[in-house]
Amino acid sequence: NAKAAIHITIRFKLDQTFETGAPGDFYLFQKYIDGNNYIRAYLAGDGKLYWVQENPVGGDEFVLISTTASWTADVLYIVTVSLTDTPTQRLLVNGVLEASSAVATPVLTPAGGDIIIGSSSDGGTNGIIGTISFVCIGVGATATVALTAAEEVALSKGVPPATAKVQYLFLMDEGRGVTATDRGSAGGNGTLDSACTWAYGQVK
């Protein structure tokens, strides 16, 4: 809550190809208080990935859009999005920087609301249809939590950075129950929604 820096990496594969003309948005994650206060990353109807922060007084703080515009079924993708008080905002797909900006220092991340992974809300119907198999989240009061270029590349291979930069790490390998164990430093376990099931060590 109310952090000046955050990075989120999600590894996923879809059950069907997502591209221009898709019938609806697929959310990778959202942290939401209200329509003027949220951060989110989602695949949109134009086939591209959007990384967005909306500030509490209204209006987009920033909007980054991927150059990748088609996501092939049964192919693993790993997406990293970040913001800092440097200010810098970045969006990477498979370790390649596809969008960045340095708008006025972004407001803090929402000071409330859970981080919902794989959908926009608990029980939401606009989540990805596929498999999420790795989630790494770093948050900090300053940009010291920011990833280096080398750490971004390592994350694209599923290798998390130093412990100080990883507060939440979900390997999605429990295979049973409803708890996704946090291997990061925060100890913030996740809870699977009823629409999610485990499949061979990965959450589906």
Image (cartoon, rainbow, N blue to C red):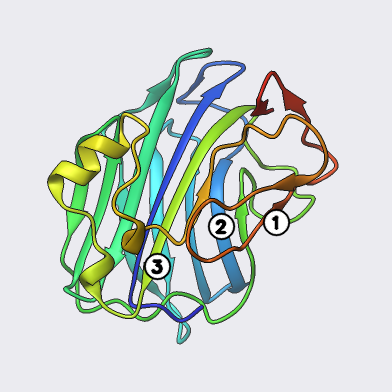
| Label 3: how many Cα within 10 Å (few below 14, some 14–19, many 20+) | many
The residue nearer to you, when weighing 180 against 18, is 180
* Residue wearing tag 2: 30
For label 1, count other residues whose C-alpha is less than 10 Å away and answer few (under 14), some (14-19) or many (20+).
many
- Name the residue at 30% across, 29% down: 94
Q: Which quarter of the figure has residue 72?
A: top left
Tally of marks: 3
Q: Which residue is mark 1?
A: 121
Between the C-alphas of marks 2 and 1, the distance is 7 Å
Residue at screen point 50% across, 43% down: 135
Choose the circle earlier in sequence order: 3 or 1. Answer: 1
* Label 2–label 1 contact, CB within 8 A: yes
CA separation in Å, label 3 and label 1: 20 Å
SS at circle 3: strand
> As drawn, is 88 to the left or to the right of 41?
left
User: Which kind of residue does numbered mark 1 sit on?
Assistant: Ser
Residue name at image x 32 percent, y 29 percent: 157
Residue 9, above or below 114: above
Q: In the rendered view, would you say 1 is above or below 25?
A: below
What amino acid type should be assigned to the residue bearing mark 2? Gln
**Which callout, 3 or 2, points at the residue further toward the start of the chain?**
2
Question: To which residue does mark 3 refer?
Answer: 139
Task: Mark 2 or mark 1: name the one nearer the start of the chain.
Answer: 2
Identify whether 26 is placed above or below 145.
above
Task: Look at label 3 and name its amino acid.
Answer: Val
